[in-house]
Amino acid sequence: AQKITQTQPGMFVQEKEAVTLDCTYDTSDPSYGLFWYKQPSSGEMIFLIYQGSYDQQNATEGRYSLNFQKARKSANLVISASQLGDSAMYFCAMRGQLRQGAQKLVFGQGTRLTINP
Amino acid sequence: GAVVSQHPSRVICKSGTSVKIECRSLDFQATTMFWYRQFPKQSLMLMATSNEGSKATYEQGVEKDKFLINHASLTLSTLTVTSAHPEDSSFYICSARSMRETQYFGPGTRLLVL
């Protein structure tokens, strides 16, 4: 079974500082995908970044980067130069091996990030 | 990124009535859509996987007769909450899987059953 663990229920960071949101996972699939989503108070889930298990390099998307450490089974999200608008819930998710039909995402419990001015 | 819409965004209904929620992928075709439920301050819980032209696959513990899912086209999936009761009040959110395997989410529907 697949499992995602986010150990930080809440984080408070000063504006313009970098922040790392932790995510560890467990799976027996040799091939999988890892995602990060942002959920502001409006409720929508906003896709931020994706990392494939066979990707050689860590994924980056603008201010977002994913610190992928396969041996440790961790996929931490790093937000550089945080902004007030980054305040939201952040969810880490994993998708299993596609050819087995395991398309569904398994979500962590989320981390509530608050950026202080 | 890809756009997924959901309608209605908010609905209040009386106990015993049925509510239909639509999920549309606006700029891509989605052979697979997913329906989630989210309680306040909790994570998303997958309810079912909706495949175009076939029956939905429900997660364990989700009543298929209670939550009817129809995926009639490559851009539309509907979730009908039948005979809704107050305990069905929740935030329902759909997602559509793109060709790049990323799931894009709709804005969600807040259901309140009185």
Image (cartoon, rainbow, N blue to C red):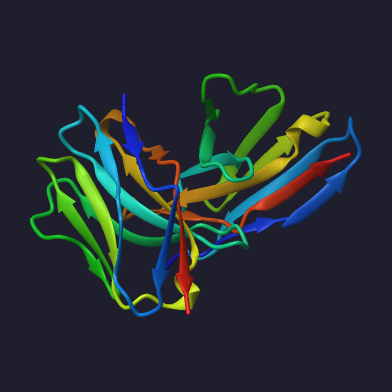
Quadrant of the rendered structure where residue A14 is?
Answer: bottom left
Q: How many marks?
A: 0
Q: Nearer the viewer, residue B38 or B6?
A: B38
Residue A43, above or below A54: below
Residue A26: x and y in percent read 25, 32
Residue A10, above or below A74: below
Specify whether B90 is left or right of A38. Answer: right
Q: Nearer the viewer, residue B114 or B54?
A: B114
Residue B23: x and y in percent read 62, 51
Q: Which residue: 59% across, 48% down? A: B93
Q: Quadrant of the N terminus of chain A?
A: top left
Residue A75: x and y in percent read 23, 50
Asked whether residue B55 is in view, the answer is: yes
Q: Which residue: 72% across, 57% down? A: B9
Quadrant of the rendered structure where residue A17 is?
Answer: bottom left
Quadrant of the rendered structure where residue A25 is?
Answer: top left
Q: Nearer the viewer, residue A107 or B41?
A: B41
Q: Which residue: 34% across, 37% down? A: A4
Q: Nearer the viewer, residue A93 or B84?
A: A93
Q: Which residue: 56% across, 40% down? A: B36
